[in-house]
Image (cartoon, rainbow, N blue to C red):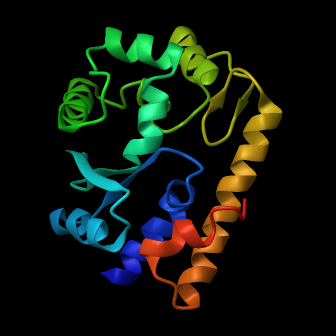
Amino acid sequence: MINKLNEVLINHCAPVLMGLKPSAIFTLDCPNCAYHLQQNVSKDFCVEALCLTDCKKILTMLYSPALLKKIVLGPKASFILSSLGYPDKINSVFVEHLKKRFAFYDDFPHEIGFLLGYPQDDVIGFIENGGQNYKHCGLWKVYSDVEEHTKCCQRYHFSGICLRKYIECGGDIKRFGDAFKFAV
């Protein structure tokens, strides 16, 4: 199980663990996996099972409450999130509301882009355009700065490489963010 969790961390969570983005979402195979994942990351991060997918996997979110708070308090995001019923604090009520939003949608609630740290103009562009008319499609649909998206994706990719090497050398996942805080 540890090897599978390490792969999840490398492939989906390295930018979060390094402090480059506030959260990541991914699927896990078993209900206990979220608990084990929480035990393997720093107490500065939270792991939350959001919902069960059609494939019977658990959609899970790893997040930094401190970084997520900065997003939620941003002017554009806070206006949209509050209009959708989110509280202005990152707490259990916020997470429960997010879970309800996932239950309400057949797919993902569009505001998830804010929580994943996508540029606010891109999230708003996606919402306003219904996912159409974008300039570029990579990790997210870009409506604003394609060059910044490319640089950001490179930083995210590099963080995964750093985490893989760190694990291969016997590094402690709980200390990964501190070990590579200034690498990217």
Residue at image coords 48%, 74%: 175
Is residue 52 visible in the rendered image? The answer is no
Vertical comparison of 83 with 110: above or below: above
Expressed as whole percent of the image width and height from the top left, the position of residue 91 reads 24, 37
Residue at image coords 78%, 31%: 146
Q: Which is more toward the observer, 67 or 63?
A: 67
Vertical comparison of 117 with 105: above or below: below
Expressed as whole percent of the image width and height from the top left, the position of residue 130 reads 52, 14
Q: Residue furthest right?
A: 147
Vertical comparison of 100 with 27: above or below: above
Image quarter where the N terminus lies is bottom left
Is residue 28 visible in the rendered image? The answer is yes
Q: Is residue 120 left or right of residue 182?
A: left
Residue at image coords 37%, 17%: 81
Expressed as whole percent of the image width and height from the top left, the position of residue 114 reads 48, 29
Q: Is residue 84 left or right of residue 134?
A: left
